[in-house]
Image (tube, rainbow, N blue to C red):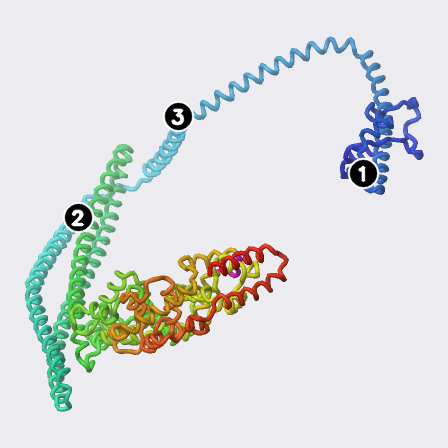
Amino acid sequence: MQPLNQINHINLKPLSQRPFSISKSQSTPKIRGSTDMRPIAKTNYLPKTSMAFSDPAYVSRIRPRQINIDKERLYEENLILKQLCNTISEENTQLKTKLSQLEKELEKNQQSTSPDIKSTSHLVENLKTVIRDVKAELQAKDKELDLLKRSTRLTKMQEMGEELQQYANECMRLKRMLMEVVNDKKPWPDNSGFLEQLQNEREQLQQALRFYQDSDALKSEEIVTLKKQLKKNDPEKDTSKKLMKDELEKLKNQLNDERKINELKPEKNDVAMQSSLAREEEEKVNEVVKNKDEEIRNLYLEMSAMEKKATRQEKIIAELQKEIKDLNSRAIEDTKKKELINAQKELINGQKDFEVASTKVGIKLEDSYKKLEESIKSDAKSESSEIKSKNSETSKNEEEFLEKNDPVQEISSEKDYNEEESYKEQQEFENPNEDVYIPDDKIELESAKLNPKEEEGLIISFLMKIKYFLMQNKLDIQEWVSDIDINKIGIINLDDLQTVLSQEAINLSQNEYDCFMKRFGENDHQVLVSVLIEELANMEMDDISDTSYDSNNKENSWILKIDKSLVEIAACEIGTRFNYNVVRDKKKYIELILNLEEYDKDSLEKLFTSENILIEKDSIREALILSILDEKDTVTKGEIIEKLGFLLRDWKPLSKSEIEGVIRRLRSLLMDEIDVIGSRVEEKSQGNDLVPMNIIIEELRIHRIISQKSEFSWAMTQLFSYNQSIYKVPYKQALEDMQEGIPFTDLNVYENPETSQIEAGSAVFEESIEEIENNPEPQYKEEYQESFNSDIDEN
């Protein structure tokens, strides 16, 4: 039979306040025991608590009224508990028999061993005390040993012992060597001749060092003289540069004067004169360029000569270093020989003198060798730094000349002189195996390899960002672009354009600059003023939707996801729709329209194409949907109410009389001042028929045709009906139609003020009531019915 701890435990759910009675099963197994076990009398081993469960009154008090457990489960649990009780009772009986047997054996043993135990117990106690004392002593001694091991004195003594052992071994080795030398019967050689040779070689080394030092001094003097000559040549070059600058400025002024004269005389006969004068000027410019090229080539020749001298000097220095290393190696070998001879002598006299002499000689030789190396390295560094400084000065002079020579290159119509070929010729002429320095301005811009669609997109992005800035700040394109041209030549440098755009916080990438200059620039860093004005004037915001360029790159992400002006126009259009539908409480009306709890892009598209809140233009509708979604997939009903409420925060409901007054006032003011507004807008549009919408609205505000928010929203939607792009409007047609009273599409209520807006609003309300009746929530119907009845009473 298994003991209690080895029985497989069963996880039973506890019974909630249910007593149970334990009854012995009829099929109880018989106890398997030995033949000498005594039978145990039948006794009741159940505890008092279990006996209490047999009382029916007690059980009825504890038992709950409603039992929520199945009878089958209770029956199974009862069986399991009975089996457990049986096994436990069997084990108890076995254990009791064993205990009784063990008690009898203990009594027998105690009776037999009682006199011996008294004698041995005293010895055991004494031994235990001795063992404790010994253990305490051991612990104390272990602690002392640890302290000794950690102490510095013991470590020093150990180190000294190791050093003594090493010295003893070294002494034994030296004694053996001495014995070997003494045992050899060869006579001592005569070392006088060998010492003289060493002295002679030492004198030769000193003479060589003096010679090299003198040669270094001469070279330093030559470098100083060359520097003086360069300083003398610098003012002459500066004066020649100043003269060339004056000549170039004169030529530029002459060209500008002739251009102005040619603009005033556009006859055919003057074209020949212009071409001949231009050719003469080009020839003069080409001569100036050739002279400058010759000067540059002379500078390159001087640089190459200096570099050759530097290479020669480096070679000489390298050879000197090799010779010094050879001499040092020889000297070291000689010192080793000397050391061996002296060692043989000093071994006989004593070991200490030999060690001192060898260390002194070695230290002196190392010091002398280090000093020589340091002096040679310092000379080499100084010469190389001087050569680099000269190269940098010459390269700066070339860059300055080339930068100043750029306008001349732009003025000339024919590009006779190819810069890359000239640099290649100079490279082949001077050093065919070495690279020649080329200034950064002469290297072609290596923009990112883009396909035509991406280039077109970057160009549109460049123009769009500038145009958007000008429209936001209400700046004139021609005035703004002409202000960038500081010299008033009709040409804008790329550096000036970049500085202006960075000051105005217009973020443009290098790829956008490169693509724009590649398409419209006269060269890599200049563009005509007229070209920039024309492209900005012709730039329309619908070009963005026409292009298929799209990229995840931040540098190329030029597409504006949400246009704020379009969202404002959408808000104005929704406001006019609300006035058309006679809405008084915008929040309740929006809650009434919104039937779903969550909206995605498709459901918002259906919402804003419905009759209640219709937005006709696709671009405006898309901008509003993007602003509501805010880069999410779905939006809740509460968020839509919040966002539309924020967009319509300035909206106020209009009555019939207010709408009629707005239309009459606009028509009368336009009748009086249509000519003034038309001429003003025509000036700002630079003679074009199309003009940005905000310019017309600004002029209407200046002349106090628009003064209220309701008038602004009406004018905004009215003007936008004529808009084929995002911003531009045919202003002549717009003003004439507004004067005649042609309305916005589908907003016929503004065309005929006599129509009953209450009837139109009630029709919309009846449709919405039909939708609400199908809805199981009746509270919206009652609230809106009350608000609508109050609005009708007011009107």
Q: Earlier in the sequence, mark 3 or mark 1?
A: 1
At a point 26% along the width and 75% down the height, the residue shown is 675
Q: Earlier in the sequence, mark 2 or mark 3?
A: 3
> Looking at the image, is mark 3 or mark 1 nearer the viewer?
1
At a point 19% along the width and 58% down the height, the residue shown is 384
**For this rendering, which residue is in front, 584 or 626?**
584
Q: Position of residue 199 (x, y in %)?
A: 16, 46
Task: Let me know if residue 561 appears in the view.
Answer: no
Q: Is residue 362 magenta?
A: no
Q: Earlier in the sequence, mark 1 or mark 2?
A: 1
Q: Which residue is mark 2?
A: 202
Magenta extent:
631-637
Q: CA distance from mark 3 to mark 1?
A: 83 Å
Q: CA distance from mark 2 to mark 3?
A: 50 Å
> Looking at the image, is mark 2 or mark 3 nearer the viewer?
3
On-image quarter of the N terminus? top right
